[in-house]
Image (cartoon, coloured by chain):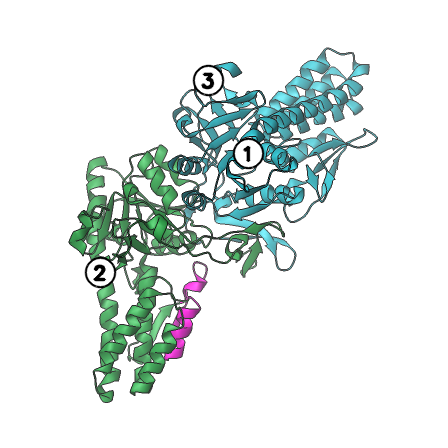
Chain colours: A green, B cyan
Amino acid sequence: MKINSTPYRTIWPTADNAAVEIIDQTKLPHIFTTLRLETMRDAERAIRDMQVRGAPLIGVTGAYGVALSMKHHASDAALKASCDKLLLARPTAVNLRWGVERMRAFLALLPESDRAAAAWQEAARIADEDVEINASIGRHGSEFIRAMHEKKTSTVNILTHCNAGWLATVDWGTALAPIYTAFDAGIPLHVWVDETRPRNQGASLTAWELGQHGVPHTVIADNTGGHLMQHGMVDMAIVGTDRVTARGDVCNKIGTYLKALAAFDNGVPFYVALPTPTIDWTLQDGVKEIPIEERAAEEVTHISGLCDDGQVRTVRLTPENSRAANYGFDVTPARLVTGLITERGVVQADAGAMQVLR
Amino acid sequence: MKINSTPYRTIWPTADNAAVEIIDQTKLPHIFTTLRLETMRDAERAIRDMQVRGAPLIGVTGAYGVALSMKHHASDAALKASCDKLLLARPTAVNLRWGVERMRAFLALLPESDRAAAAWQEAARIADEDVEINASIGRHGSEFIRAMHEKKTSTVNILTHCNAGWLATVDWGTALAPIYTAFDAGIPLHVWVDETRPRNQGASLTAWELGQHGVPHTVIADNTGGHLMQHGMVDMAIVGTDRVTARGDVCNKIGTYLKALAAFDNGVPFYVALPTPTIDWTLQDGVKEIPIEERAAEEVTHISGLCDDGQVRTVRLTPENSRAANYGFDVTPARLVTGLITERGVVQADAGAMQVLR
């Protein structure tokens, strides 16, 4: 999507194919800066330090990490060492494992002398596949926005939570792909952006990427969505997801469940956008079966932002001796989900309907 | 309640009855400091600058403001000027108007020479009445906590939103009064404190006052309550309210509705604590009839906290060009409310049951 009128991806090869560049997402929204990754170590550091984040983008960065290592040492031993090292950058990232293992399996079959060039092409292919999946989610999901616009003949108001935008993928995003697609097609729309405490991915990343692409949006406290829905100010909600069970329960950023309850209570359609590999067919009851990660309490007690003096500073919000708890995700039961928007089409969030995606 | 083991009210006359002291609530939770109000102007400034906040406390501070003015000038003209000036400190505060007008009506009947002493006693009476109302709410509400403890025979987990604690009143608070009463009676309990964006009254004020009194508590992002309720980690929710309609719809800090939805969805009792004058008998449908105040966007885009250097600093959270919206309150429909805890007992949130409070 666009940054200040120029089209970007979140990761791209340099003109001479000697390196890849990324956006340093730790600096957003206050500073836009790109980083050049020349070695596997650079890629590993970018993943570990969360300069790239979002499952699909981490996977692609891992793949490029393998490709960068092949430029320097293409032996079996070097391939194994690079892949193993990259996996340790974020051991729990499923997409990182997927991207790195795909590269490992692909390269293992090739002679050493072919590996550098082939790895570069394969990493680019993985990136392009991600873009195509998200573009397809965008085409399918934008039909709901178009239909809503035709029905109400005025601006369509869409609420989203967290960042499931192009910054989390190579391009388009998942939840934001339908929004960008509809916006680029000239459908008048406006996005309510949940700030998404405690890490504020909405207020920082979603607001920034929508603003750069020119999409009208308004940041709100996470407490606000219910009130807006009660007053007809939200036409639909679209969120992303980290994991969907076989019966359609949706694990996503903490607070998603509360918005889904409000949407259901007010008859507002609640859509979840996802690439089909996000479905974990081994799980049924998401509330019972998905363990919820507890993250550092400091993400609740402290927050960073841009100070008057131009510095990004961290301030403490809570009393010195108060404990805080930080659950990263929650599970929205399938009964609250209007539809799953995938690259293969839209399906209902129930075990029977989802069979077509198997 | 207690601050560092010493019992306090939020406003109290000095030993020589020459002035009143207050806690400067703008400095909490990072700095505890008291202020001496010697003149009507001091009281007016404390109200205007929100050094005192919470409807009951503002009303009492207004009453003391009138009393302070009578010490210096007790003429009819001075009485009128003082009352009129105090009302302008926060023109929309219903309790301020109530406290000041009660003083005006009471003093107007007295000879000038009696006014100073009588005003001081009347202001103290208004403060004591607030304490007694809240203590009564505490007694009634604590029975639910006691019953829950007897049923589960382990720590009772209570979720609250915003600050309806003793800092918002003269003592005890409304939503927190049952909690303090149960805690002081030795019932094991723990409070989940919603941080309550955007102004963070939970993370700053509720966490601070619970901590000072020794009540176990944990601060959470506002997004978290639904997840906790899904997992049996909340036994009941107790919140305050700014206005209740004749049929029991509850206007309270933005985000209350979302927690009430989650409580209903998970069978968690959801109580609202209030003094009966909070009921507006002229209103029925809260969602339709109660206008919701829009506050400054800066409360969403910026936040203050304690910086590493010991200074309280303000940082910007959002991109420079992103709009923000800030709705202060929402309305929880009566169907989601388990009971109204008042100083006159507990009643169901419906028009028929509420007749006993009329």
The numbered mark, 3 or 1, whose residue comes first in the sequence reads: 1
Subunit of label 3: B
Residue holding disc 1 = B145
Q: Nearer the viewer, mark 3 or mark 2?
A: 3
Reply yes or no: does residue A32 show up in magenta: yes
Rendered image quadrant of residue B81: top right
* Residue at image mark 2: A133
Q: Nearer the viewer, residue B316 or B195?
A: B195
Residue at position x 45%, y 46% in the image: B224
Instruction: Kindly state the secondary structure of the residue where label 3 is placed.
Output: helix
Q: Where is residue B201, by image quadrant? A: top right
Residue B147 picture location, percent across and down: 54, 32
The CA distance from mark 1 to mark 2 is 52 Å
Q: Residue B353 — which label? A: 3
Quick check: marks 3 and 1 in contact, CB under 8 Å?
no
Amino acid type at mark 3: Ala
Q: Amino acid at mark 2?
A: Ile
Range covered by the magenta-colored residues: A24-50
Q: Residues within 10 Å of mark 3 (few under 14, many from 20)?
A: few
Q: Is residue B128 above or below residue B266?
A: above
